[in-house]
Amino acid sequence: MIHPIPPGTRDVLPDEMRELRAITEGLRATFVEAGYGEVATPALEYEDVLRAGDPGAAGAGYRTFDERGQVLALRSDMTIPIARLVATRYRRTDGEALRLCYLGHAYRAVATGTGHQRELLQAGLELIGVAGAERDAEVISLALAALDGVGLARHRVGVGDGALYRTLMEVFEVPPERRMELLECLARRDLVTLAARLVGMGLAGEACETLVRLPETRGGPEILEQAVGPVAGALGGLRALYAALSDRGVADRVILDLGLVRELGYYTGAVWEVYDPAVGFTLGGGGRYDDLIGCFGEPRPACGLALDVQRVHIAQAEEEKLG
Amino acid sequence: MSAGRKVPAGMPDASNPGEDLAQVPNAPNDLTIAVPRGALFAGSLDLLDRLGVDTAEVRANDRKLLFEDAGIVTMRPSDVPTYVEHGAADIGITGKDVLLEQPERAVYELLDLGYGSCEMVVAARRDDDALGEALRRLGRVRIATKYPLIAARHFSETGRQAEIVAVKGSVELAPLTGLVDGIVDLTATGKTLAENDLEVIEQIVTCTARLVANPVAHKLKAAQIDAIVARIRGAGA
């Protein structure tokens, strides 16, 4: 007799559990040692509370009613619940940095047969109450160190500016009503349609060329040196972040990516993604979200990063094979 | 990451990610390329030849699927986004029709390769206005297709109610037997439609071959992928 579990979820048996536990303990040890206190939040939240942080309730895939008819949603990421936690449990804003880390499951809607995860275990960290590239670099380099700590060796972090494309569309005077469709092409990674739309808009040669090429502009520090015109002018934030990452000695791990966009809407500045050659998907990602906590209370700048533990496990197993 | 993958020896050059890869001669061979069998097969192999990939073994062998020396894996066009999304292939070639039907696959669509041009069309029996009749009297049309998503979107966008019937085999049979009022299918010449007494009623979209890339490979193997893109652009292929 077969008693199925939903596609994209899984049982974990002792052999795998032992290895997963070693990874989560390793990641947490690095985070806690760096002064990040571990927190937990409920997997179920009121949908309207999640919505306060993100109009789409951060893509919650599962809703149910409680005994009083209120709509509950399973969290689809940890950042919005933590923004709520910070705004409600740490009301005093004395300008001090608040460092939090977590280990928790998030839930996403997936199509059957795609191989995507419905329930995913995330390990992450959030640095709240302080702004600046130096703080972004702290979070990024800590995540890289945590992955070193669990045996990964070939991982890289892509960093970009989530607002760059918007800024340049403004500079190049792309008609405001056409900007959304371009951003949607970029988010879908459909560079063919993006280029066709840009050419069709009749922008000046340089503007068109720049906006077409931007999503494929990625690499080392030469990206910053070779930038000209309005792009060079818009790269101040990324330059500062690269300098801060260099100071922390992790520049060799960094891929500068001018086309990087993250799917979640709450990012306000720098964004980042973690890659490993053993895994076809990102190991995780994050960014700066200076406006999110203000949706729940006193505004506070913040940035964070979440890692997908199962994918880290795949990368670790591959690394062990290479010996 | 995949069967037959050559794992790069040693760590990439620390000072400049990607730079070390650019120095490897014959760059395309370091990438695993998903090549579609079927209508796009010949055009895809011709393109790879022009890029300096040796496709002789692929051309000579109809049943083998994995060609490690050339870095080529062959598959149905509709499987290409799956292999590329999961990183089992770094880049791949497939039709725009496949990409439109599988929007949940997170892959970069890098280039319109231009060849393999086909039309996605609505077709119905010749001369009896089955579609219009069904809409007027029954308030909806029944449409058979291998592209349920594209078909549903087209009828929804044009304000008509449609019942989509997903079929796997020859779609042309469905309206002839009375299963449906019309079909949505891909046609290159319209020959098969005509031979089955069907005619094109509406054109939905033109579909050509596209170059797609895995999002992680697009970052970690930027130099090799950019080299291929630049050569295809340069050749005007």
Image: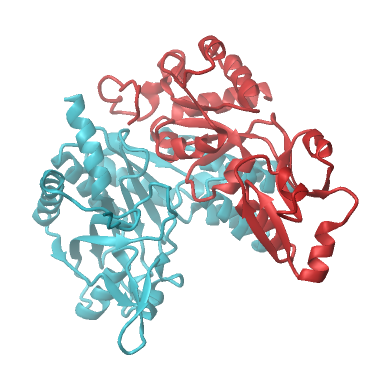
Residue A17: percent from left, percent from top? 13, 48
**Residue B112's image quarter?**
top right
Q: Is residue B15 left or right of residue B90?
A: left
Q: Residue A194, can we see it?
A: yes
Q: Residue at x 26, y 32 (%)?
A: A154
Q: Quadrant of the C terminus of chain B?
A: top right
Which residue occupies the foreground of this view, A76 or A28?
A: A76
The residue closer to the viewer here, B109 or B231, is B109
Could you say where residue A128 lies in the image, as x and y percent from the top left? 25, 66
Q: Would you place residue A204 above or below residue A306 in this image? A: above
Q: Nearer the viewer, residue B152 or A33?
A: B152
Q: Residue at x 41, y 36 (%)?
A: B219
Compared with residue B159, is residue A72 higher up or lower down, i.e. above or below? below
* Chain letter, colour cyan: A
If the image is split into quadrants, where does the N terminus of chain B sit? top left
* Count of numbered circles in the view: 0
The chain coloured red carries which letter? B
Viewer-closest of B144 and A123: B144
* Residue B153: x %, y % from top left: 65, 58
Residue A115 lies, in percent from the top left, at 38, 46
Looking at the image, is A191 positioned above or below residue A169? above
